[in-house]
Structure formats: C-alpha cells, structure tokens
Amino acid sequence: MIQQGGAPGSGSARPAAPRGDFPLQTGADHLIRLESITKIYGSGDAAVVALDDFSLDVGAGELLAVMGPSGSGKSTLMNILGCLDTPTSGRYWFGGEDVSRLNETQLAHVRNRRIGFVFQQFHLLPRLSAWRNVELPLLYRGEQDRRALALHALDQVGLSNRVDHRPTQLSGGQQQRVAIARALVTDPDLILADEPTGNLDSVASRDVLAILRDLNQQGRTIVIITHDPEVAPVAQRTVVMRDGRLVHGVAA
Ligand code: ADP
Ligand code: MG
C-alpha cells in the first residue's frame, strides 16, 4: 500500500525541454512534466491568460509546494494537474503518458485511478463514518476488501481509533486526516492537496503537514497548493506563481 506505484519515467523519445526561466529536472524519474502550458479562459477582449507558457517538472517521490497570490493561477494549475481541466495549449505528461489531449472519459480514468485529492473543505459526507467515507473511492471502482483497505489508510493517518466516528464527532484536523486517508486508499501515484491547512488552526495544521511529510517520506508524490508559509518547511521544493508564470523556484 505504501509503495510508489513505480511511475514510469518520461522515456527518451521526448521532445527537447521547452524554454523556461527555471531549469527542468533532467532524468527519467519525474512523475509530472508540464511543457509550455497555456490556459486561456474566454476569448476576444474577455480572454484571461491564467497560465502563460508554464513549464514544471515534479519528480516521482517529491513533495512540492506551490505558492502565489490570489489570481496567480494556482487553481487553474491544480485543475490541470488533477485532470479536471485541459490546457489551451502545451503538453502535460503524467507518468510518461501525454494526458493533455485526453477526452473527458479518459481524464476521469486517470483522475480516479491515479490521483488522490485533498481539499480545504474536507468534503466528507456527514452521515457516514470515517471508514465509510474512506472507502468511497473504492466503491466507484468495484473494489473488494474495501473495509480492510479503508482501515489500513486510516491507520496510516493515525486514526485507527476513530474509524466509526462521523465527521461531526471529529476535530477539523481529524477530518482532514480522514480526507487524506480517502485520497490514499486507492494507492494513487499523486496526492494533490489544495489549501489542505486552510481551515485548520496552527496545531492541526502542523499535524496534517506532518502526516503529508510522512507519506512523502514513504515515497508518495505530493503537490500542495497553498498560501500557508508553514507548508514550505515540509516541502522539498517550493515554487511561487504570479500572473500565470513561475517567478521563483527554490530547492530545499
Ligand atoms: P488562484 O487560484 O491563484 O487565485 P486562478 O487559477 O483561480 O488563480 O485564476 C487565475 C486567473 O484566471 C484569474 O485572473 C482568474 O480571474 C481567472 N479565471 C479563473 N477561472 C476562470 C474562469 N472559469 N473563467 C474566466 N477567468 C477565470
Ligand atoms: Mg485558487
């Protein structure tokens, strides 16, 4: 359950890396490669360039923090990384596969099989116990052994003693840990977290970040999109966005 799913590398038949202000990682061990991604909403006078010739690699096993002010394109980036939306132009390679031109059905497949999502608002179903919430992604794929897998995921986030609790019986930090277990239960290649500490106090934030860091140290690839400066210390690398571009990249 803990292993990284042996993400295929980028292969050698790739076109040369695009121009960019930040050197792309070389080597075949990246899980994600964004090549000159542009995303334009609307058209004509109303067109908004949300991502502007944006290139970024994320290594398999990396924990990357993406920061930037409101309107800088973080949610747009999250939607593209999560296969929730497609770029206007450019290429998105995920695990060696070009996912930038997939249709909605194919995107849903990548999303459901290979990516686990964690959101600011937890998005737990209030009437279901913790383990019933965690098993949900497995229901959609007709998995057997759902309870065992859900209990294992809850154990990985330190909630073995809360499996029958409902969300209202859990603290915010515990609810977010349930959400992380739900993201983890399908053994995804990538965990994509959008402001995972945005609704938490500082103690619960540290708790959730420690869990994400532990999962990363076990080999899980994680991208955290955030305003929270507390995230950077647990990340191996932090990049900063502004106006749809990277303005700053720091190796930890
Ligand atoms: P962030 O998450 O960093 O606040 P977004 O990705 O939400 O940034 O937005 C980037 C830019 O794209 C902003 O100027 C925003 O107004 C615009 N934008 C985002 N979504 C849409 C949309 N669906 N239609 C038109 N413009 C959008
Ligand atoms: Mg946003």
Image (spheres, rainbow, N blue to C red):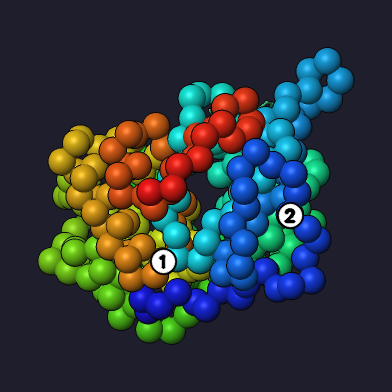
What is the x, y in percent for residue 85?
A: 68, 46
User: Which residue does the numbered mark 1 point to in the structure image?
Assistant: 220
Q: Give the total number of marks visible in the rendering.
A: 2
Quadrant location of ligand 1?
A: top right
Can residue 168 be seen in this snapshot? no
Give the farthest residue toward the bottom.
144
Inter-mark Cα distance, 1 to 2: 25 Å
When asked about the image quadrant of residue 25, the answer is bottom right
Mark 1 surroundings: few (<14), some (14-19) or many (≥20) residues within 10 A: many
Using the image as rendered, state which of residue 247 and residue 54 is in the foreground: 247
Q: Which residue is mark 2?
A: 17
Q: Residue at x 13, y 66 (%)?
A: 161
The residue type indicated by label 2 comes to Ala
Q: Which sits in the foreground, 82 or 60?
A: 60
Residue found at x 26% / y 50%: 208
At 30% from the left and 44% from the top, the residue drawn is 233
Image location of residue 237, percent across then percent down: 43, 48
As rendered, which of 18 and 61 lies closer to the eye?
18
User: Dot 2, how many residues are within 10 Å of its Cα: few (below 14), some (14-19), or many (20+)?
Assistant: some
Measuring from the top left, give residue 207's x and y in whole percent.
Answer: 20, 50
